[in-house]
Amino acid sequence: MNSSWFRLLLSALLLGTLAACGGEVAQVPPQQWQGMEVRVEPRPSPLHDGTSEFLVMVTDNRGKPAYNLVVSLRTSDSEPWVQAIEDGQVGVYRRAIKAGPDAVLQVQIRRKDAEGVLRFTLKQQP
């Protein structure tokens, strides 16, 4: 097994374990960008007013991690973009920013040939 697949498997297991231990995680539907699936997980979940961490997970059209992207976050058009930190080459980007329970998280994704913005509604569905 090559090391990148091992890291991906290990990361998935760790994320699953953290989600299982952390209680309920808000279900934010994934979105598509340039043939990639983009998922967002807020921490803590459900969100409270204040600073929260966001995991942005990106996979390509084959289900493999999409890395070497520049991912930035904000919760308002008036806020500056804040670049997320890439966790190795496993397609996971993370950043803590201020967000309330009714926030709309804007995720800007850039790669050398394209740029786009996705909006994720974080409000807990009843």
Image (cartoon, rainbow, N blue to C red):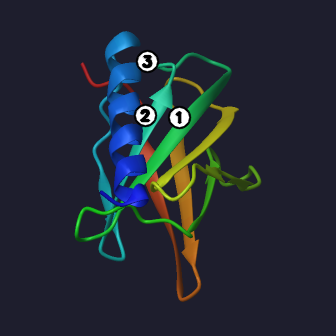
Q: Nearer the viewer, residue 31 or 101?
A: 31
Which residue shows up at 31% across the image and 63% down it? 64
Q: CA distance from mark 2 to mark 3?
A: 9 Å
What is the x, y in percent for residue 25?
A: 35, 22
Circle 3: element type: loop
Q: Is residue 76 left or right of residue 47?
A: right
Label 2 with label 3: CB-CB less than 8 Å: no
Q: Is residue 9 left or right of residue 102?
A: left
Q: CA distance from mark 2 to mark 1?
A: 6 Å
In this view, 114 is above or below 17: below
Point out which mark residue 122 bears: 2
Point out which mark residue 46 bears: 3
Q: Amino acid at mark 1?
A: Ala
Residue assigned mark 1: 103
Label 2 with label 1: CB-CB less than 8 Å: yes
Which residue shows up at 25% across the image and 71% down it? 61
Quick one: label 2 or label 3, which is nearer the N terminus?
Answer: 3
Q: CA distance from mark 1 to mark 3?
A: 11 Å
Point out which mark residue 52 bears: none
Quick one: label 1 or label 3, which is nearer the N terminus?
Answer: 3
* Circle 1 residues within 10 Å: few <14, some 14–19, many ≥20: some
What is the x, y in percent for residue 73?
A: 62, 51
Q: Nearer the viewer, residue 78 or 29?
A: 29
* Circle 2 residues within 10 Å: few <14, some 14–19, many ≥20: many
Circle 1: element type: loop
What is the x, y in percent for residue 108?
A: 57, 62
Q: Amino acid at mark 2?
A: Leu
What is the x, y in percent for residue 44?
A: 51, 19
Quarter of image, res 125 = top left
Q: Amino acid at mark 3?
A: Pro
Q: How many marks?
A: 3
